[in-house]
Image: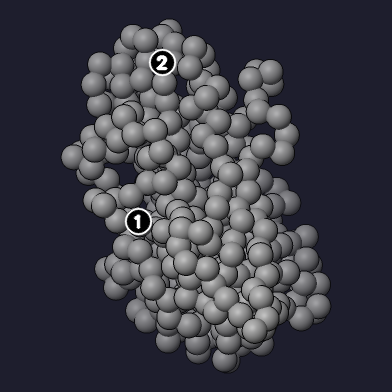
């Protein structure tokens, strides 16, 4: 199926302009390639095509496409659903590990020693060295290489008082990660305006999403929720802790939420709290030959809509759309754009660059970005 893939380099990128007003401070060149390439393809091949198009989160994309096709056919999740959920869990866990161990030391302004210690931790990580077989060792590895305390204790303290716990942990622990986050607090622990959290869709919301994806050409690239921009991420899960139902007040707390989710995914199963049941999926039959699916993945909530030529898996795709987390968070009027707008257009470019890099770490787009440096006064 490689002949159906877009040419290399067309994944798109973001252009950020700190200090400018919305919507002129954030521009995305991302395209919904699945919507362009899937029509005419056999329905049962859509999940594989989605996984190849979006290789960074291939398992989540395959699973979401599969659930949408099954819903369009009036079928429940297939017999392999449990196996697909396990693969989604592991993919999301590995993605959090890579971002924390590879991106954070480089983008949060850490000391050279932090990058060396992160690289050593990366080399020893059982979940990355032995995919599928090293998960049982991960809580102990986290305690030793990242947290400086048992993973369960860290998560319990986060659930009670996230901000207080994160501050105390950074102040009292000497490991590379608390020191890195502690140093980055100066430019990341500042309150910013943010959009409401994108809620988990119910039946009515699923119907509304499907209708808008089908009829509004720009909705999949610039979505809104009930007339407002919204944001999604590890801090807006279906099973979000009752004490954490509002958007984190700062980029620093969003970084903390990413670390907290890594710990949740690494801990043994506990319903509605951690383990393999933490990430949720759903599917909705919308109409004859039409289905919608949602999957929680590393960057937030992923949604697929598909319409088939007839209601069975031998059908062909008539049209489909992907609504990805990046389109919510990097909407030209969304949370990241609000943060960019609040920064001065003139000033110290080094300071603004540090803020932008931290913001990127917090919201984690699935594409590259470039920043237009602020002008000096």
Give residue 314's quadrant in the image: top left
Q: Residue at point 67% right, 37% down?
A: 10
Residue name at image x 69 percent, y 18 percent: 3
In this view, 107 is above or below 88 = below
Q: Mark 1 Cα within 10 Å, few/some/many (few <14, many 20+)?
A: many
Q: Position of residue 177 (x, y in %)?
A: 65, 77
| Residue drawn at x 48%, y 27% as measured from the top left | 35
Q: Mark 1 highlights which residue?
A: 229
Left or right of 135 in this view: 9: right
Label 2 secondary element: strand
Name above or below for residue 16 compared with residue 4. Answer: below
Res 236 → quadrant: bottom left
The crowding category of the residue bearing disc 2, from other C-alpha atoms within 10 Å (few below 14, some 14 to 19, many at least 20), is some
Residue 261, image x and y in percent? 48, 62
User: Dots 1 and 2: beta carbons under 8 Å?
Assistant: no
Q: Secondary structure at mark 1?
A: loop
Q: Is residue 142 left or right of residue 120?
A: left
Q: Pick whichever, 342 or 169, lies toward us.
A: 342
Report the residue marked by disc 2: 318
Q: Is residue 193 visible?
A: yes
Foreground residue among 366 and 165: 366
Relative to 174, is 252 above or below? above
Q: Quadrant of the N terminus?
A: top right
Q: Earlier in the sequence, mark 1 or mark 2?
A: 1
């Amino acid at each position: 199926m490689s002949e159906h893939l877009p040419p290399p380099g067309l994944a798109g990128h973001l252009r950020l302009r700190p200090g400018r007003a919305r919507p002129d401070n954030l521009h995305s060149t991302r395209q919904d390639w699945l919507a362009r390439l899937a029509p005419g393809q056999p329905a049962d091949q859509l999940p594989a095509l989605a996984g190849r198009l979006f290789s960074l989160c291939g398992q989540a994309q395959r699973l979401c496409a599969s659930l949408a096709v099954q819903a369009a056919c009036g079928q429940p999740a297939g017999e392999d659903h449990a196996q697909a959920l396990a693969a989604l869990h592991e993919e999301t866990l590995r993605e959090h590990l890579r971002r924390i161990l590879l991106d954070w030391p480089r983008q949060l302004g850490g000391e050279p020693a932090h990058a060396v210690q992160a690289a050593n931790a990366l080399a020893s990580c059982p979940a990355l060295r032995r995919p599928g077989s090293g998960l049982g060792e991960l809580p102990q590895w986290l305690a030793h290489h990242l947290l400086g305390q048992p993973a369960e204790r860290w998560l319990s303290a986060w659930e009670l008082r996230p901000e207080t716990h994160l501050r105390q942990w950074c102040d009292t622990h000497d490991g590379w990660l608390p020191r890195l986050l502690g140093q980055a607090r100066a430019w990341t622990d500042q309150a910013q305006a943010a959009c409401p959290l994108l809620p988990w869709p119910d039946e009515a919301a699923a119907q509304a999403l499907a209708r808008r994806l089908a009829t509004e050409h720009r909705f999949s690239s610039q979505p809104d929720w009930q007339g407002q921009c919204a944001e999604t991420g590890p801090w807006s899960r279906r099973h979000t802790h009752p004490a954490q139902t509002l958007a984190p007040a700062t980029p620093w707390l969003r970084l903390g939420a990413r670390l907290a989710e890594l710990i949740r995914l690494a801990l043994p199963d506990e319903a509605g709290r951690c383990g393999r049941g933490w990430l949720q999926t759903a599917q909705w039959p919308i109409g004859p030959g039409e289905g919608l699916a949602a999957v929680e993945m590393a960057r937030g909530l992923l949604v697929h809509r598909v319409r088939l030529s007839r209601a069975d898996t031998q059908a062909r795709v008539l049209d489909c759309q992907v609504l990805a987390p990046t389109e919510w968070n990097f909407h030209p009027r969304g949370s990241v754009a609000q943060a960019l707008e609040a920064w001065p257009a003139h000033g110290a470019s080094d300071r603004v660059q540090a803020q932008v890099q931290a913001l990127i770490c917090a919201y984690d787009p699935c594409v590259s970005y470039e920043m237009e440096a602020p002008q000096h006064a």
